[in-house]
Image: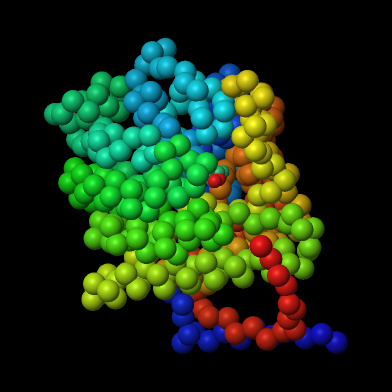
């Protein structure tokens, strides 16, 4: 008979889980916003256009913090397009997903949606096509009480109280050539440093995450983290990590073992961050924000395919249908996050609705759960408190995975 054992001892604790470990992500991508969380005219929509059936499922799923508005989208986003009277907002071509962005949903609607869902908002600023100036203006618009042009504009738009957004991402996947205004680590490090400095001058209570590598397989991985943190170490609390698991090889054993690479990724980024601290003789510890993770491979698309479709608004793209096998790998990733609760202090399942998501909808129709909904909901509901180190004894197998 095969046997396995797991031993726990209360004396061997890894750390306490931060409530932000159970986050998710809403990007202006496909039907995540339009036809997902927001669909005016849907039978369950409230007067603000928020779908109640989706909100109910989100509450059951239990995400604690929500990243917005991207993703690749944010690297070309003018946040000013998404505020003010809806009739005056411009439609724009989105070069991340080759769609048309109508801008009928923006920062204020997102914050209202988060409040309705009882979720902390996390905003990413555009450090692709824009820089520290647009970022600091957004912090002033959102968090300054009033009496300045940007804060008074928020009040004029109908939001008297500041949004008080604490968690800010300094751009997205800037190391990736697919990103609008992709940068080298030196170029990004400088921009992130200056943006962070000004954002914090406006609101010293904010917390900032610098972009780490968009995957452990990036050619610049490791050197990127090292140089970016050399520039931003004193300005940021977090460095980000992104991972998407795949079973391209149709190798179940390797796929099921692949969350081991998440462990390795986390431990390597901790080592690099601590090396930067050591060079400065600093006892500051940079925490990790694993702000995109999931299984994603069936619905990846090359840019040439996107272009052929002719700039649609909210097309059904990246609508991955998840299997039981995916849910097991996903559960492995949840355990990897919990096992690093001492250093991973924020994480976002990418994404929330329709786009590589635990929740699916039909535009105009019902909403339902995918297989990956269940491990996430259990992790968020039960994974609170102190994580104990698990000593696992079982048979093992060799697997190679890329
Ligand atoms: O989550 C989908 C995309 O994956 C995001 O827009 C991007 O940041 C990542 O490459």
- The quadrant the N terminus occupies is bottom right
The percent position of residue 5, horizontal first and vertical second, equals 69, 85
Q: With respect to residue 59, does 288 lie above or below?
A: below
Q: How many marks?
A: 0
The percent position of residue 397, horizontal first and vertical second, equals 75, 78
Instruction: Give the camera-side residue of 50 and 251.
Output: 251
Instruction: Give the camera-side residue of 47 and 400.
Output: 400
Instruction: Tell me, yes or no, if residue 35 can be seen here.
Output: no
The percent position of residue 318, horizontal first and vertical second, equals 65, 39
Residue with the most extreme right position? 1
Q: Residue at x 40, y 46 (%)?
A: 183
Q: With respect to residue 293, does 303 lie above or below?
A: above
- The quadrant the C terminus occupies is bottom right
Instruction: Give the camera-side residue of 160 and 316.
Output: 316
Q: Residue at x 33, y 48 (%)?
A: 187
Q: Residue at x 50, y 44 (%)?
A: 177
Q: With respect to residue 310, does 174 lie above or below?
A: below
Give residue 375's quadrant in the image.
Answer: bottom right
Task: Please indicate whether residue 292 sits to the left or right of residue 257 in the image.
Answer: left
State ligand 1's quadrant: top right
Q: Residue at x 54, y 61 (%)?
A: 216
Residue with the most extreme left position? 147
The percent position of residue 114, horizontal first and vertical second, equals 44, 39
Task: Please indicate whether residue 230 sits to the left or right of residue 339 in the image.
Answer: left
Instruction: Tell me, yes or no, if residue 266 can be seen here.
Output: yes
Instruction: Give the camera-side residue of 249 and 46.
Output: 249
Task: Please indicate whether residue 6 sits to the left or right of residue 284 in the image.
Answer: right
Q: How is the image coloured?
A: rainbow
């Amino acid at each position: 008979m095969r046997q396995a054992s797991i031993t726990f001892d209360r004396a061997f604790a890894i750390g306490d889980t931060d409530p932000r470990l159970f986050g998710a992500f809403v990007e202006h991508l496909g039907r995540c916003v339009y036809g997902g969380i927001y669909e005016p005219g849907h039978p369950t929509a409230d007067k603000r256009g928020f779908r109640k059936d989706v909100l109910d499922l989100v509450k059951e799923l239990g995400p604690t913090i929500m990243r917005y508005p991207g993703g690749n989208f944010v690297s070309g986003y003018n946040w000013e397009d998404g505020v003010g009277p809806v009739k005056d907002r411009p439609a724009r071509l989105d070069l991340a997903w080759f769609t048309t962005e109508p801008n009928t949903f923006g920062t204020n609607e997102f914050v209202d949606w988060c409040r309705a869902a009882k979720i902390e908002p996390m905003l990413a600023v555009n450090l692709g096509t824009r820089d520290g100036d647009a970022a600091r203006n957004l912090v002033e618009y959102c968090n300054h009480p009033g009496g300045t042009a940007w804060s008074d504009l928020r009040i004029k738009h109908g939001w008297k109280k500041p949004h008080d957004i604490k968690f800010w991402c300094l751009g997205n996947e800037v190391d990736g050539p697919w990103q609008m205004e992709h940068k080298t680590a030196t170029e990004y490090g400088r921009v992130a440093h200056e943006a962070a400095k000004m954002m914090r001058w406006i609101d010293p209570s904010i917390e900032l995450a610098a972009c780490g590598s968009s995957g452990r397989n990036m050619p610049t991985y490791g050197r990127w983290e090292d140089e970016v943190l050399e520039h931003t170490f004193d300005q940021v609390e977090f460095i980000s990590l992104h991972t998407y698991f795949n079973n391209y090889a149709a190798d179940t054993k390797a796929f099921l073992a692949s969350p081991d690479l998440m462990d390795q990724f986390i431990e390597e980024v901790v080592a690099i961050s601590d090396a930067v601290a050591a060079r400065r003789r600093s006892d500051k510890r940079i925490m990790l924000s694993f702000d995109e993770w999931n299984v994603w491979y069936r619905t990846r698309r090359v840019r040439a395919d996107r272009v052929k479709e002719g700039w649609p608004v909210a097309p059904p793209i990246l609508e991955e249908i998840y299997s039981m096998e995916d849910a097991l790998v996903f559960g492995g990733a949840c355990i990897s996050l919990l096992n690093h609760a001492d250093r991973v202090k924020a994480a976002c399942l990418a994404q929330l609705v329709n786009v590589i998501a635990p929740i699916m909808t039909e535009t105009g129709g019902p909403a339902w759960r995918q297989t990956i909904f269940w491990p996430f909901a259990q992790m968020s509901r039960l994974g609170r408190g102190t994580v104990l180190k698990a000593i696992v004894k079982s048979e093992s197998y060799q697997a190679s995975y890329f």
